[in-house]
Amino acid sequence: MGEFSNKVVLVTGGTRGIGRAIAEAFLKEGARVAVTYVSRDDKARELEKMGILAIKCDVANRDEVKRAAEIVSSKLGDINILVNNAGVMYLMPFESYNEELFDRMFAVNVKGIIYTTLEFLPQLKRTRGVIINIASNAGIGTAFEGTTYYAITKAAVIILTKRMAFELGKYGIRVNAVAPGWVETDMTTAGRTPEEVEKAKALVRSRTMLSTTGIPEDIANVVLFLASEGARYITGQTIVVDGGRIDYLTHGI
């Protein structure tokens, strides 16, 4: 019997990287787990063999999210824990603004959380559930070139978390966020050669107090804590998990 036995968990964007680590961690602790995904059918099949329900769903499409909510309810029952993890990142300097790419990031990273939460909210009300949003330390303001427009979407996630906590607390629903630093996943290594990945990791290590980079399990561990009874008095918070970044954009007097 694990800590989350008899709990139902949904992780959006759960077939790869941080999302997969979260899904597998909950499964290991006895939960019944569902994930959504967009394109990687092969990864979805791997999770299904482990006993995880995989649903093809673009969280930026509310009709698809509504269908996913119906599937999860019929197959697993009402969810107790929602992890809004699905996200996309396109690197572009401020002067190289691409409206199509920015709109896609905002649709997935921000609207996706709104749509998923709204469609699963009736279930979460019945279970007095927990919501955990995956933000990013970029949304707090790290000095990493090319992430301005991505950072805008993740800053939105951080304030959205506080507003959701404020408005949903009356239902006994807790809402928190986790803001990862640089974690080696498909998202952070996409389009980069192995040499470029190592260069990026070296740069991050030079900008953290612990001189290291993260792995998906580092984030999963914090998510499981926030979903647990040990965090029953925590809501509206963003927990930064980034090895102690020292390059935040700040100002003072």
Image (cartoon, helix red, strand yellow):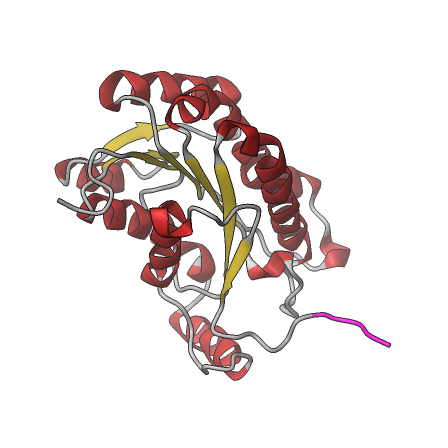
Residue 248 locus on image (x, y percent): 66, 71
Q: Quadrant of the C terminus?
A: bottom right
Q: Is residue 165 magenta?
A: no
Q: Magenta span covers which residues?
A: 249-253
- Tally of marks: 0
Residue 147 or residue 28, whichever sits in front: 28
Q: Is residue 97 left or right of residue 160?
A: right
Report whether 44 appears left or right of 162: left
Residue 101 visible from this viewpoint: no
Residue placed furthest toward the right: 253
Up-down: is 55 above or below 94?
A: above
Q: Quadrant of residue 76?
A: top left
Question: Residue 131: x, y in percent?
Answer: 46, 39
Q: Nearer the viewer, residue 235 or 19?
A: 235
Considering the whole magenta stretch, tell me its main secondary structure. loop
Q: Residue at x 64, y 67 (%)?
A: 142
State which quarter of the image contains the N terminus: top left
Vertical relation: 122 (above or below) 23: above
Q: Can the viewer see residue 192?
A: yes
In the displayed structure, 220 sits above or below 124; it is below
In screen coordinates, is 119 left or right of 137?
Answer: left
Residue 214 in the image: above or below residue 154: below
x%, y% of residue 81?
A: 37, 36
Q: Per the image, is 251 magenta?
A: yes
The residue lying at 15 percent from left, 36 percent from top is 51
Q: Nearer the viewer, residue 40 or 87?
A: 87
Question: Which residue lies at the image location 36% right of the left edge and 54% below the top edge?
Answer: 225
Residue 138: image location, x then y, percent: 60, 60
